[in-house]
Image (cartoon, grey):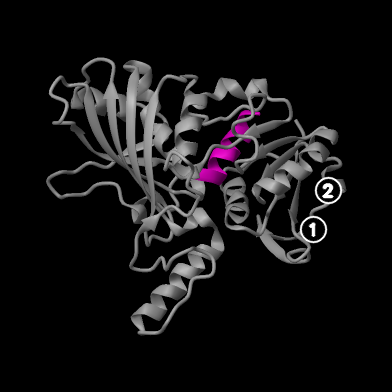
């Protein structure tokens, strides 16, 4: 089966990760087109020992294309979606533009791959923090329905893009050298600092990132009654998000049951060595496909045995974005 692919936003952090993953997974295609803004047009990017030239993104860019991997920002996804569908292509969109659209499937392949079949030209990739949480939480929910999840995130600069990653490096150097530093990408200095996620806070006091985790999880799980409370925080990590997850089940769930379920679940590697104090870390999760899961333990504040605690790390650019989209494309 022939497949002509276009990457929209090819020069960004997720766009270049698309290239790496397509090459590593030997994704079968006949042609690959790289699309970006006029500012990036003419640049070259390496793919399978070739140098591909980036083209300017226009309404005509999608003629002859079957699959579009999009990560150029929500406004551009909305702007160019009619042109993609008009060309007969399918867009796997990595922005928030269509995630909560009832006509658009929101997919984590380890959770709800069957939803892909319902697409009408667009399939949405969930928020990175949602993906990293849902991969380990879903297999537990299937066995013992989850009533409530309380999650705190430790989010890397990569979540704000390549420019934020560079700003963290520059800011760290400046602080170590005793030089003044004013951030331009993030609202506060990221180096040696922790601050609430840089998204708008709504009237209920939760920011947009936190509400994405709530709403997206309900949609992906097809479980509108599941309760989710999130606190999302930026930490001075370049790449890979971590999350502390507290789960309340409908019925008692033992630590051993959780270990056995997660050991057999796709997309997960258990890292949980209490003796050596080795648990999931973003340095270890970076450039890995799997979500690392550890600190598996009973929640001692729930004496009825219905509570479990987890700590997880996952590569935000990879499984939290580009890999998830490529997995969807493979299933298409």
Contact (CB < 8 A) between labels 2 and 1?
yes
Q: Residues within 10 Å of mark 2 (few under 14, many from 20)?
A: some
Task: Report the residue marked by disc 1.
Answer: 55
Q: Secondary structure at mark 2?
A: helix
Query: In the image, what residue occupies the spot 37% across and 24% down?
Result: 139
Query: In the image, what residue occupies the spot 46% across and 29% down?
Result: 217
Q: Is residue 243 left or right of residue 163?
A: left
- Residue in front for this viewpoint, 21 or 319: 319
| Magenta stretch in the rendered image | 320-332
Question: Residue extending furthest front?
Answer: 203
Q: Position of residue 282 (x, y in %)?
A: 36, 53
Name which quarter of the figure residue 65 lies in: top right
Q: Position of residue 219 (x, y in %)?
A: 52, 25
Answer whether residue 209 is visible to the viewer in this image: yes
Task: Report the residue marked by disc 2.
Answer: 61
Q: Is residue 315 above or below residue 168?
A: above
Answer whether residue 49 is visible to the viewer in this image: no
Q: Is residue 282 left or right of residue 80?
A: left
Name which quarter of the figure residue 244 lies in: top left
């Amino acid at each position: 089966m022939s497949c002509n692919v276009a990457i929209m936003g090819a020069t960004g952090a997720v766009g270049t990760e698309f290239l790496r993953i397509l090459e590593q997974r030997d994704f079968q295609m006949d042609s690959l087109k790289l699309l970006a803004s006029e500012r990036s047009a003419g640049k070259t990017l390496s793919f399978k020992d070739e140098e591909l030239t980036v083209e300017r993104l226009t309404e005509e860019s999608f003629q002859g294309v079957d699959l579009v991997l999009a990560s150029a920002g929500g406004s551009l996804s909305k702007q160019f979606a009619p042109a993609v569908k008009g060309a007969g292509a399918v867009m796997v969109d990595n922005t928030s533009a269509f995630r909560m659209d009832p006509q658009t499937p929101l997919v984590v392949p380890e959770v709800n791959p069957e939803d892909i079949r319902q697409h009408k030209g667009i399939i949405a990739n969930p928020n990175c923090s949602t993906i990293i949480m849902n991969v380990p939480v879903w297999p537990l929910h299937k066995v013992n329905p989850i009533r409530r999840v309380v999650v705190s995130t430790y989010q890397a600069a990569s979540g704000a893009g390549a420019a934020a990653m560079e700003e963290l490096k520059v800011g760290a150097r400046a602080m170590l050298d005793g030089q003044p530093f004013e951030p331009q990408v993030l609202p506060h200095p990221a180096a040696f600092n922790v601050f609430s996620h840089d998204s708008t806070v709504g009237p209920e006091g939760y920011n947009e990132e936190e509400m994405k985790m709530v709403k997206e999880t309900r949609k992906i799980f097809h479980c509108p009654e599941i309760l989710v409370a999130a606190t999302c925080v930026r930490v001075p990590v370049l790449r890979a998000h971590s999350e502390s997850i507290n789960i309340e089940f409908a019925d008692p769930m033992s630590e051993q049951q959780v270990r056995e379920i997660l050991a057999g679940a796709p997309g997960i590697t258990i890292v949980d060595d209490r003796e050596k104090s080795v648990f999931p870390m973003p340095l270890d999760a970076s450039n890995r496909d799997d979500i690392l899961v550890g600190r598996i333990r009973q929640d001692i504040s729930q004496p009825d045995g219905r509570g479990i605690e987890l700590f997880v790390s996952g590569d935000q650019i990879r499984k939290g974005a580009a890999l998830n989209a490529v997995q969807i494309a493979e299933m298409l």
